[in-house]
Image (cartoon, helix red, strand yellow):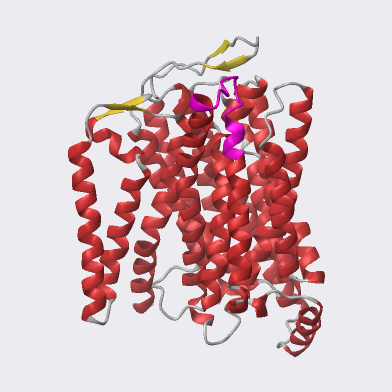
């Protein structure tokens, strides 16, 4: 799985891990922060949440255009600095009035613009590693590894957000609504310092992918030297990419309900305590042990030396030992905070990535591996199944309700104690869809985009994601305006229709993917 990959992949992946840890620490509590700190109802919190996510994924278009002119590495560095300033401003508890609201909006603009410069261009650099013929056949695997590293950062983010917020509330006296959440935003500042440190410490392994004035000239020379695509071929590739972008919109609209309507469901309808063995899924270190078991198991069977097999076996046995110990210590009960459910998606991504890679590698050997467009279509179907689970979980539940808080503003009201395993299962199924769609989509863009439009087309991927994320706010609009099962049905239907559209366009898409 990890053999034969360029060294620069791991450096870029780790740099991105630090940045993503900070981002997802913020996202884990952001929707709840908007309601607690500013007293917003579900609709307006959803509007701001969707607008922010939309900007985060729209501005890489501008970032891609700037990088095509000035170089990818320069934009990545500037992006980290701007993001740091945004998170720093978010870290100050300025209250829930006009000053606090204006400061938050400015901070969101800084974070989204910095992300626009950083995120897409870093991924273009990853793709550039595989322009070397030595690594060309490892592109899909490389993007899967890169995507897995993103989720290692996201895995620890909800726990970090909850723990630091609880510490600020219980030990530092920040008991006013929303104040303690600012400390979760401060974690993002620290993670960016780590990210830039990794980037420059290992820069030598990927410097050739950064671009710059010389690289811009080299790129122009490469475009001239590249077997020239006809206008028709260029058009076919761009049209194919735009078709994929259209489908991606509806996937992210549904998928990123994890930070909005699914978090509302966790907060208002899901049991707030767990006891005994049922506490184990909510301890992030238990999830880490499972990851060690998965990777240790794969390493054991794939290792070529006895020493490597022995080390792998020791890792697996040690992780199993920890889980057995914690199982016997799992007594009493714990509180369940809504943001903690967001750890399950990144956990599943990290744990299942080697499984999915092994499955597709096996299919590839038999000549039966689905094309990237076909994987994307399957991902939409899987996402629909996930919302089918939520429909079953919501049958018989009342409509979401709101009560008036001490500040006179509406806030969510806990009305049921549904089993947390409904959400845990939903995140598992959504993750299968994500693994089929997201890394494969990024790989498809980096492979199909004409060389002179590569940065712009990667920006287009994020632009489509931006539209999808802006439409996430639909979940906030539907919340409280229709029965819960109907809310999830809307997303199920959109996923099914997107999959059908993708299959209808499959011949055209697979033609350019060859």
Q: Position of residue 129 (x, y in %)?
A: 59, 77
Visible residue check, residue 510: yes
Would you place residue 232 above or below residue 316 in this image?
A: below
Left or right, residue 400 beside residue 223: left
Extreme bottom residue here? 225
Q: Quadrant of the C terminus?
A: bottom right
Rendered image quadrant of residue 33 = top right
Q: Residue at x 52, y 77 (%)?
A: 7
389 or 138, nearer to the observer:
138
As for residue 183 lying within the magenta part, the answer is: yes
Q: Residue at x 66, y 21 (%)?
A: 40
Q: Residue at x 27, y 58 (%)?
A: 293
Left or right, residue 392 beside residue 376: left
Would you place residue 130 above or below residue 414 in this image?
A: below
Q: Position of residue 111 (x, y in %)?
A: 70, 46
Boundaries of the magenta span: 170-185
Disc count in the image?
0
453 or 164, nearer to the observer:
164
Visible residue check, residue 247: no
Left or right, residue 81 beside residue 261: right
As for residue 460 lying within the magenta part, the answer is: no
Q: Quadrant of the N terminus?
A: bottom left
308 or 138, nearer to the observer:
308
Rendered image quadrant of residue 237 = bottom right
Left or right, residue 314 beside residue 226: left
Q: Position of residue 452 (x, y in %)?
A: 76, 75
Rendered image quadrant of residue 386 = top left
Q: Position of residue 511 (x, y in %)?
A: 58, 73
């Amino acid at each position: 799985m990890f053999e034969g990959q360029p060294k620069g992949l791991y450096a870029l992946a780790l740099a991105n891990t630090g940045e993503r840890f900070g981002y997802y620490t913020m996202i884990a509590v952001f929707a709840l922060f908007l309601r607690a700190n500013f007293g917003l109802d579900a609709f307006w919190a959803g509007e701001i949440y969707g607008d922010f996510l939309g900007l985060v994924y729209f501005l890489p278009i501008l970032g891609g255009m700037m990088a095509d002119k000035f170089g990818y590495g320069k934009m990545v560095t500037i992006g980290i600095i701007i993001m740091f300033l945004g998170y720093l401003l978010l870290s100050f508890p300025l209250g829930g009035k006009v000053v606090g609201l204006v400061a938050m909006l400015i901070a969101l603009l800084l974070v989204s613009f910095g992300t626009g410069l950083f995120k897409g261009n870093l991924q273009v650099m990853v793709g550039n590693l595989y322009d070397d013929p030595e690594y060309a056949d490892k592109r899909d695997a490389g993007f899967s590894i890169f995507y897995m590293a993103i989720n290692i950062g996201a895995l620890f983010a909800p726990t970090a957000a909850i723990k630091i917020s609880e510490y600020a509330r219980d030990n530092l006296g920040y008991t006013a609504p929303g104040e303690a959440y600012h400390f979760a935003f401060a974690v993002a500042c620290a993670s960016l310092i780590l990210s830039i440190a990794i980037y420059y410490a290992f820069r030598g392994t990927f410097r050739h992918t950064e671009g710059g004035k010389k690289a811009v000239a080299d790129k122009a020379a490469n475009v001239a030297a590249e077997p020239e695509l006809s206008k028709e071929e260029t058009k076919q590739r761009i049209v194919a990419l735009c078709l994929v972008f259209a489908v991606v919109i509806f996937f992210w609209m549904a998928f990123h309900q994890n930070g909005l309507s699914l978090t509302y469901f966790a907060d208002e309808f899901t049991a707030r305590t767990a006891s005994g063995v049922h506490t184990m899924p909510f301890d992030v270190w238990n999830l880490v042990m499972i990851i060690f078991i998965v990777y240790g198991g794969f390493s054991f069977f794939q290792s070529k030396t006895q020493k490597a097999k022995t080390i792998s076996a020791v890792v697996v046995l040690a992780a199993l030992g920890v889980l057995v110990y914690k199982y016997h210590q799992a007594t009493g009960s714990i509180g369940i905070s809504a943001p903690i459910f967001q750890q399950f998606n990144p956990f599943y991504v990290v744990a299942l990535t080697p499984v999915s890679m092994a499955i597709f590698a096996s299919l590839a050997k038999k000549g039966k591996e689905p094309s990237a467009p076909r994987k994307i279509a399957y991902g939409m179907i899987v996402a629909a199944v996930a919302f089918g689970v939520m429909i079953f979980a919501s049958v018989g539940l009342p409509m979401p309700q709101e009560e008036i808080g001490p500040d006179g503003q509406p806030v969510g009201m806990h009305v049921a104690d549904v089993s947390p395993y409904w959400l845990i299962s939903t995140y598992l199924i959504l993750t299968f869809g994500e693994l089929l769609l997201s890394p494969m989509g990024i790989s498809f863009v980096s492979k199909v985009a004409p060389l002179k439009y590569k940065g712009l087309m990667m920006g287009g991927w994020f632009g489509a994601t931006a539209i999808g994320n802006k439409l996430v706010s639909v979940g906030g609009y539907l919340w409280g305006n229709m029965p819960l099962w109907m809310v999830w049905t809307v997303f199920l239907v959109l996923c099914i229709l997107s999959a059908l559209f993708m299959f209808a366009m499959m011949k055209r898409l697979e033609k350019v993917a060859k």
